[in-house]
Amino acid sequence: MAAAGAAVVSPVSAMLNAIAGKQCKVLLVNGSPRADGNTFYCLKEIETQLQKHGVASEIIQIGRTPVRMCINCDGCRQNGGAGCVFDDDAFAVIAQKMKDADALVVGTPVYYGQPNGGILSLMQRLFYSAGHLVQDKPAAALAVCRRGGATATLQTMNMMFEMMNMPVVTSQYWNIAYGAGKGEVKLDTEGMQTMRTLADNMAFLLEKIHGSGSPAPKREERRLFMNFVR
């Protein structure tokens, strides 16, 4: 399932688009197996708010098809950088979409205090085999739970963003919303406001990055690795 948002461009965003030569786009990934569950409603709230800033967006649903985990085969490094050797699931769709996306938002339900296994497998493969597609792009995670485990879920997702030099977009609170039954999350007024504030902050950061035209910080030429046991 994919839903693209039609943007109504504000004066500030119109100026940004003219400077950048294109409309910024955010890819929103729904890590829930339920196409229209509470995670989707949170992503939809973000998308609606992004539209007000003239930022384009697309929601991608990973669905219920099994997602392969990374098997550490290093095939992605041995095939000339062509990407993950597995291309028969949601990974291929997300990787293709990330080529044109300027930012990433990942939503997941909370399973035993952790993200959905499918979204974890997908993100680990994406970041390992195609990290160049996400480097330096703003990112945010959101977690939906019935009662607890959301902060641990957010920490797990954010740790991946931090390793890829992705600016983590914040909100007025942790990016959490509460709900069990379908649509209940919409009753969490604070949670919905948190999603809108997240979208506002995402649009603000994209304006600063693309409006200024400043390149990403130059990295040291050699990446250093240090094992604790030698």
Image: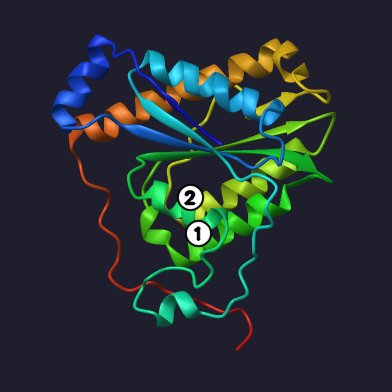
Q: Nearer the viewer, residue 51 or 218?
A: 51
- In x, y percent, where is residue 4? 43, 28
Q: Quarter-wise, where is residue 61 in the image?
A: top right
Name the residue: 48% across, 51% down: 93
Q: Nearer the viewer, residue 155 or 65?
A: 65
Give the quarter of the figure containing the C terminus: bottom right
The amino acid type of the residue labelled 1 equals Leu
Give the quarter of the figure containing the N terminus: top right
Q: Which mark is residue 126?
A: 1
> What scheme was used to colour the molecule?
rainbow
Q: Which mark is residue 94?
A: 2
Q: Earlier in the sequence, mark 1 or mark 2?
A: 2
Q: Is residue 212 above or below residue 89?
A: above
Name the residue: 51% across, 64% down: 87
Are the residues tagged 1 and 2 within 8 Å (C-beta)? Answer: yes
Disc 2, SS: helix
Q: Check disc 2: other Cα within 10 Å, few if <14, some if 14-19, many if 20+.
A: some
- In x, y percent, where is residue 71? 63, 74
Q: Nearer the viewer, mark 1 or mark 2?
A: 2
Disc 1, SS: helix
103 horizontally vs 105: left or right: left
Name the residue: 25% across, 57% down: 218
Tell me if residue 33 can be seen. Answer: yes
The amino acid type of the residue labelled 2 equals Ile
Give the CA distance from mark 1 to mark 2.
Answer: 8 Å
Q: Nearer the viewer, residue 146 or 86?
A: 86
Q: Quarter-wise, where is residue 202 in the image?
A: top left
Q: Is residue 120 above or below residue 198?
A: below
